[in-house]
Image (cartoon, grey):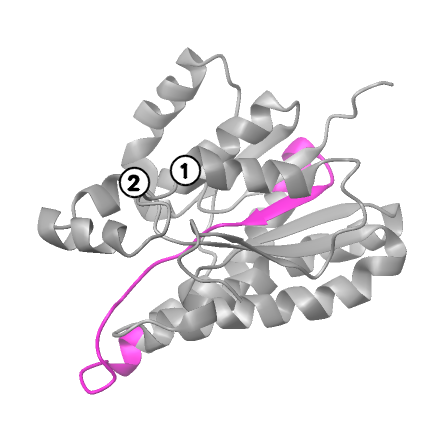
Amino acid sequence: MTQITRITVVTGGIGGIGTVICQRLARDGNKVIATYHPSEEEKLEEWTKAQNELGLDIGMVAGDVSSAEDSARMMTEVQERFGPVDVLVNCAGITRDNTMKRMAAEQWDAVIDTNLKSVFYVTKPVWEGMLVRGFGRIINISSLNGQRGQFGQANYSAAKAGMHGFTMTLAQEGAAKGITVNTISPGYVKTAMTDAIREDIREAIVGGIPMRRMALPEEIASAVAFLAAEDQAYITGANIPVNGGLFMH
């Protein structure tokens, strides 16, 4: 059977987890486009060089996913340059942690805008095309903390829980048209960010995980690749936990 090259967008694609998702999907034969925030421009040359050294040709488009207008412009640019989007991975996200007592409205808004509103802003411009063509894969990267909450993360936990509500509704709207919409909720993942956590705190975190280790970014990417696959047409509206048994329900 001929392999169809699917146009695949990964928001936050040059981040720690986003990069590995891009690499995996590119190796699987997709034409991958990584989106990045305009403020990350200085990282591009080094990032692109690293992907080229791996033999990967990944497209790149800048955009602020917290803005409805810029998200629409960004996704229009993607489709004009590369073609209609078949697979969308909403991976862009930030944290602005603080307890409720100390959390400023700006911290709340920044996380809700980037982690939750962005999912609507980025998906909206490609949704109608997926309905018309009768194919689509949308994968929303949520978090364990959207399922169980986390001290000091009212903004982040609310945004990540909201992502799955969006997933379940869109899954119902797209099901008859060949579109699957799913959530992946990682637990703690070994990245530069978690490596920077103080060693004793990191050890305490790992000690609470039944598998006694953090996830590798490749394990998140593997779950994404599974849901993005051409023949994975009957799983929709699901929230896939990739957390080493830290939270079971």
Say above or below: 26 vs 40.
above
Magenta-drawn stretch contains 97: yes
Q: Are marks 2 and 1 in contact (CB under 8 Å)?
A: yes
Q: Is residue 136 visible?
A: yes
Q: Is residue 150 left or right of residue 98?
A: right
Q: Quadrant of residue 119?
A: bottom right
Magenta: main secondary structure equals loop
Magenta-drawn stretch contains 149: no
Q: Secondary structure at mark 2?
A: loop
Kind of residue sitting beneath label 2: Thr
Residue highlighted by disc 1: 217
Magenta segment boundaries in residue numbering: 78-107
Which residue is painted at 24% across and 40% down in the image? Answer: 192
Q: Is residue 79 visible?
A: no
Say above or below: 180 vs 190.
below
Q: Quadrant of residue 71?
A: bottom right
Please name whichever residue, 187 or 59, is drawn nearer the observer in this view of the structure: 187
Q: For label 1, count other residues whose C-alpha is less than 10 Å away and answer few (under 14), some (14-19) or many (20+).
A: some
Q: Is residue 183 left or right of residue 161?
A: right
Label placed on residue 191: 2
Q: Secondary structure at mark 1?
A: helix
Please name whichever residue, 233 or 8, is drawn nearer the observer in this view of the structure: 233
Residue 162 coordinates in the image, percent (x, y): 53, 72
Which residue is painted at 79% across and 21% down in the image? Answer: 3
Residue 233 coordinates in the image, percent (x, y): 80, 45
Which residue is painted at 37% across and 45% down in the image? Answer: 211
Q: Earlier in the sequence, mark 2 or mark 1?
A: 2
